[in-house]
Image: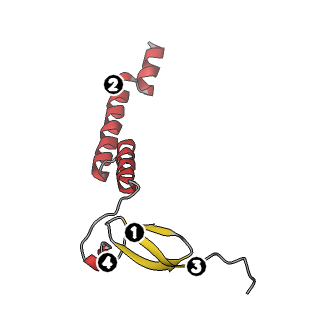
Amino acid sequence: MKKGIHPKYNNQVKVTCSCGNTFITGSTLDEIRADLCSKCHPRYTGEQRIVDTENMVSKFEEREKLAAQKLDIRSKRQKQEERRTKREHRHTQRSTSSKTLKDLLKEMHA
């Protein structure tokens, strides 16, 4: 091995978890801060919880709310019913406001 290129290895590095648990390990770092450890990780504790250290969950929920507001969230039946009523409305307007070709020809000859 080449000398002087490898970082200094420390056998007594203190690891501090966000739950308050501490333990000693070896590392090239002087101190380690962790979000989860074996005392608080859901895999080991059996308890279901969301670790939201950077507010990622709340940001995701906000994006979901905004997306739901922007999108047209209606059921398929509601959309079909709206299209049907629009179509019927156009048809009734057309038949009452416009004249047929036969009516136009009668007016021209009269």
Give the position of the C terminus as an image quadrant.
top left
Looking at the picture, which amino acid does disc 3 mark?
Tyr
Residue 96 got which mark?
2
Q: Which one is earlier in the sequence, the residue at label 4 or at label 3?
A: 3
Q: Quadrant of residue 17?
A: bottom left
Q: Secondary structure at mark 1?
A: strand
Q: Who is closer to the viewer here, 53 or 74?
A: 53
Pointer 4 and pointer 1: residues touching (CB < 8 Å)?
no
Looking at the picture, which amino acid does disc 2 mark?
Thr
Q: Who is closer to the viewer here, 105 or 60?
A: 60
Q: Which one is earlier in the sequence, the residue at label 2 or at label 4?
A: 4
* Mark 4 or 1, closer to the camera: 1
Left or right placement of residue 28 versus residue 67 in this view: right
Pointer 4 and pointer 3: residues touching (CB < 8 Å)?
no
Left or right placement of residue 32 versus residue 45 in this view: right
Left or right placement of residue 69 versus residue 104 in this view: left
Kindly identify which residue carries mark 1. 16
Kindly identify which residue carries mark 4. 43
Which percent across, then down, holds residue 69?
35, 42
